[in-house]
Each structure stands twice: as structure tokens, then as C-alpha cells.
Amino acid sequence: MLLRPWEPQDAPALYAVLADDEVWPWLGATPQRCPDVEAAARTIARWSQLADGPLGIWAIEAADVADPTPCGSALVVPLPRSDGAPTEAVEIGWHLHPAAWGRGYATEAALALVDRVRDAGLPLLHAVVREGNDRSMAVCDRLGMTRLGPTQEWYGTEFVDHVLRLG
């Protein structure tokens, strides 16, 4: 598995993930299906601005396939409070195309990002997961995260909060 920056030519691969009906309903505060490849290209351009030390959104490439097209994303980004108050909270997350599910890519990518965050000295990571997203809950469990339960503290909507203490 390889984590690398998303590149403009990856827009069709990102579109395939963000437009998939088994993926997009789980993403973000107000899930919306990615409408087209051009929107995916704009998303890649926006994501490229987020890279800062251990923070960013990376493409996941499977090392065990002939086609190195990205099969999903892994991220470490600032976690916005619902009330807009300043916070130092950081979120880890992942989303993969269903064809890549069940192969350990999300866990492998997340473990690599946990190492980056730990090396950068950040003390805590959150994962906020929609209730019912059992695959992501299982990744949180494999990472050793503690499930805090439902909260509306982040993004202005309800998620199940998980934390991983790194210090």
C-alpha cells in the first residue's frame, strides 16, 4: 500500500470513490454524491491546499494490483467543533472504493498516518464515524481506538466519536 498526494490526473479515480452509492452516504456532515469528474478535480485541488506536516489527505494505492490507480483516501485533518469554538482536535479518516474493501488497505493506511502523527508529537486523534458504518468502526477497533459514543460536538451533526491517545 502506498500513500501519496492526490494528483490532477487522479480525478476519475476519486470520482469513482466519491460517487459510489456505498461510499458517499457515509462522508462528511452533509453527505452528497460527487456529481462528475470535474467536481472531483476541484476536490483534489482543494485537498492539495491542506497538506501541512502530518496533516493532509492522501491517495491510497494498492501495492498488490497491476493498476496503480488510487482506490481511496486516508486523511488527517483539523476537526471542527459544531459551535465554531477554536480547537486543536485532529481527525483521522479513510474512504475506499468498495472494490478495495476487505483487503486491509484502510487499516494499513491509518496505521501509517498514526505513526506520522505520533512522530509529529500530536497527543490525540479522533475518528468520527456515522452510526451504522460498521466497516469504519472495525478499522477504529483495529487501531486500538476507544469508542466514546455518539456526539454532536463535531461538524454540527451526530457521529460516533473514537479517540486514540498517542502520548
Image (tube, rainbow, N blue to C red):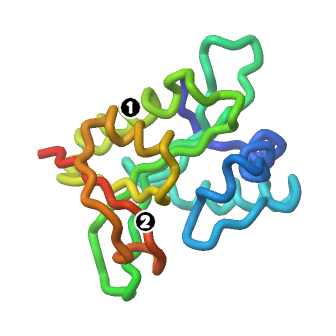
| SS for dot 2 | strand
**101 or 89: nearer the viewer:** 101
Mark toward the viewer: 2 or 1: 2
- Residue 125, placed above or below residue 59: below
Q: Which residue is mark 1?
A: 112
**Quadrant containing the N terminus in the rendered view:** top right
Percent position of residue 21, x then y: 76, 51
| SS for dot 1 | helix
**164 or 122: nearer the viewer:** 164
Dot placed on the residue nearer the N-terminal end, 2 or 1: 1
Inter-mark Cα distance, 2 to 1: 24 Å
Number of other residues with Cα within 10 Å of mark 2, as a class: few under 14, some 14 to 19, many 20 or more = many
Q: Which residue is mark 2?
A: 159
| Residue at position x 79%, y 48% in the image | 15
Q: Is residue 4 left or right of residue 150?
A: right
Percent position of residue 68, x then y: 71, 22
Quadrant of residue 129 within the rendered picture? bottom left
